[in-house]
Image (cartoon, grey):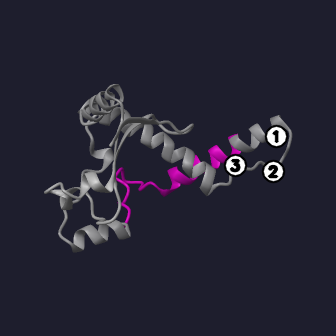
């Protein structure tokens, strides 16, 4: 067994890698729960303790209502940016000059706001919900409960 081998890639977080040889893995009585291959050795990767502790703390923080409310706002903004970039072609400008590009962005934003306002019901009712996605239909067919929608998080 080689322990610990820091496995550092330029784009990845550091990992501690434990490599077990075939001879070390074969006699282990619960090997079938660990590895599926009969012929090859086993590698076990683990982040450094500081990184693992940080991931645990951040994961616990993400379950709090306060964090979920803050993320709901971010999700709304990212949805709007995605709509502009993909739905209205805002990744490419029609003009090369900065003032004309700014004007294109302003006019597109005005048009999107008018489009959104015109699609709202006039009686003050909530807008109709979107039809379920194929993934949500699949969950329904298999009897899995749907998770709360991110907008349902209390603010």
Q: Secondary structure at mark 3?
A: loop
Which residue lies under the disc numbered 3? 91
Q: Secondary structure at mark 1?
A: helix
- In magenta, the rendered stretch is 106-131
Give the Cα separation between the discs numbered 3 and 1: 14 Å
Which residue lies under the disc numbered 1? 100
Residue nearest the observer in this picture, 36 or 134: 36
Residue at the image point whose x is 26% and y is 51% from the top? 24
In which quadrant will I find the C terminus?
top left
Q: Position of residue 29 (x, y in %)?
A: 13, 57
Is residue 155 placed above or below 146 in the rendered structure? above
Q: Secondary structure at mark 2?
A: loop
Is residue 30 placed above or below 141 in the rendered structure? above
Q: Position of residue 148 (x, y in %)?
A: 25, 50
Task: State the image quarter where residue 133 is shown.
Answer: bottom left
Q: Position of residue 128 (x, y in %)?
A: 36, 60
Which residue lies under the disc numbered 2? 94
Residue nearest the observer in this picture, 143 or 101: 143
Task: State the image quarter where residue 137 is shown.
Answer: bottom left
Of badges 2 and 3, nearer the viewer stands 3
Q: Are marks 2 and 1 in contact (CB under 8 Å)?
A: yes
């Amino acid at each position: 067994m080689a322990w610990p081998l820091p496995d550092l890639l330029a784009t990845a977080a550091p990992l501690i890698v434990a490599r077990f040889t075939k001879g070390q893995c074969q006699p282990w009585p619960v090997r079938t729960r660990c590895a599926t291959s009969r012929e090859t050795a086993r590698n076990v990767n683990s982040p450094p303790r500081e990184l693992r502790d940080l991931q645990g703390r951040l994961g616990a923080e993400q379950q709090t209502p306060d964090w979920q409310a803050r993320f709901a706002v971010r999700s709304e903004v990212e949805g709007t940016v995605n709509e502009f970039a993909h739905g209205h072609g805002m990744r490419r400008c029609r003009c090369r000059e900065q003032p004309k590009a700014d004007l294109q962005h302003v006019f597109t934003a005005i048009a999107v706001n008018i489009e959104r306002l015109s699609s709202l019901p006039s009686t003050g009712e909530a807008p109709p919900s979107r039809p379920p996605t194929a993934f949500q239909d699949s969950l329904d067919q298999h009897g899995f409960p749907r998770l709360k929608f991110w907008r349902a998080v209390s603010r």
